[in-house]
Image (tube, grey):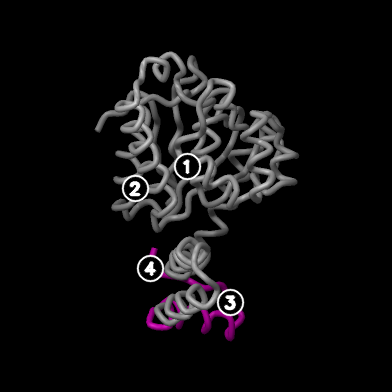
Amino acid sequence: MEYKNIKFETKEGIGTVTVNRPEALNALNLDVINELIDVFTAIGANEAVNIVILTGEGRAFVAGADIGWLKSLGPVDGRALAMRAQYLMELIETTEKPVIAAVNGFALGGGCELAMACDIRFASDKAKFGQPEVNLGIIPCFGGTQRLPRLVGKGMAKYLIFSAEMIDAQEALRIGLADRVVPADELISAVETFAKTIMSKGPIAVKMAKASINNGVNLDLKSATAYEAEAYVSTLCTEDRIEGMSAFLEKRSAQFKNK
């Protein structure tokens, strides 16, 4: 598929997806959502990609959805949009490969929801986060009312959604919406360095850790720890486990093959 609204490139096992509508602050519309679905589906089957960076072109990560387009939607079209966008968020969240958001600027509305679907969020010190939908007489519908309280707590999520307040990167870091803040001109290099750190670890172990966290977080503790135990056992059956433990005992760097 030829992309008109996003860019995709691979380098040394890192796949970088860039939303590329800088003239519209990378606002989401159905075309962008469909292109993101296509690229993340392809990434899942691409053995050359071990980890993904998601970012935006210009001064925005994604500054929400295209409001002119949203205004034209009725209940039927609106429901279809919500379901399509939620499918995208779930696709990003559940892909076996780690996905890191490099939040370079505005991450508002659908952009904040997109960042929350990623595993880890690095933010530029110029980044801004928010869920401003109530200003428009609507609510977040790409998963924001569900992922935000899971990240920052129910009370803080209500505060941000009810007030539509936009917060800076340091406040996002304080409340747990961002995981690290770096200077704007160091954002991509910092994310790439972190991506390479993850890629140096046991790839099957990283995959199973992600699955255990994602699937266990909404279970009761007994069920979640049982899931964790089975995920752990599955790693014991891999060459990665032999290599990792041997490397530790031999005081050398592990050379994992299953990448």
For label 2, count other residues whose C-alpha is less than 10 Å away and answer few (under 14), some (14-19) or many (20+). many
Viewer-side residue, 163 vs 55? 163
Q: Earlier in the sequence, mark 1 or mark 3?
A: 1
Residue at numbered disc 4: 258
For label 3, count other residues whose C-alpha is less than 10 Å away and answer few (under 14), some (14-19) or many (20+). few
Give, as a three-letter code, the residue at label 2: Ile
Residue at numbered disc 2: 43
* Disc 4 to disc 2: CB gap under 8 Å: no
Quadrant showing the N terminus: top left
Residue at numbered disc 3: 252
Any mark on residue 143, and which? 1
For label 1, count other residues whose C-alpha is less than 10 Å away and answer few (under 14), some (14-19) or many (20+). many
Viewer-side residue, 156 vs 84? 156
Q: Earlier in the sequence, mark 4 or mark 1?
A: 1
Dot 2 falls on a residue whose secondary structure is helix
Give, as a three-letter code, the residue at label 3: Arg
Give the Cα distance between marks 4 and 2: 17 Å
Q: Is residue 120 above or below residue 242?
A: above
Give the Cα distance between marks 1 and 3: 44 Å
Estimate the x, y position of residue 103 in percent, counting from the top left.
Answer: 59, 36
* Disc 1 to disc 3: CB gap under 8 Å: no
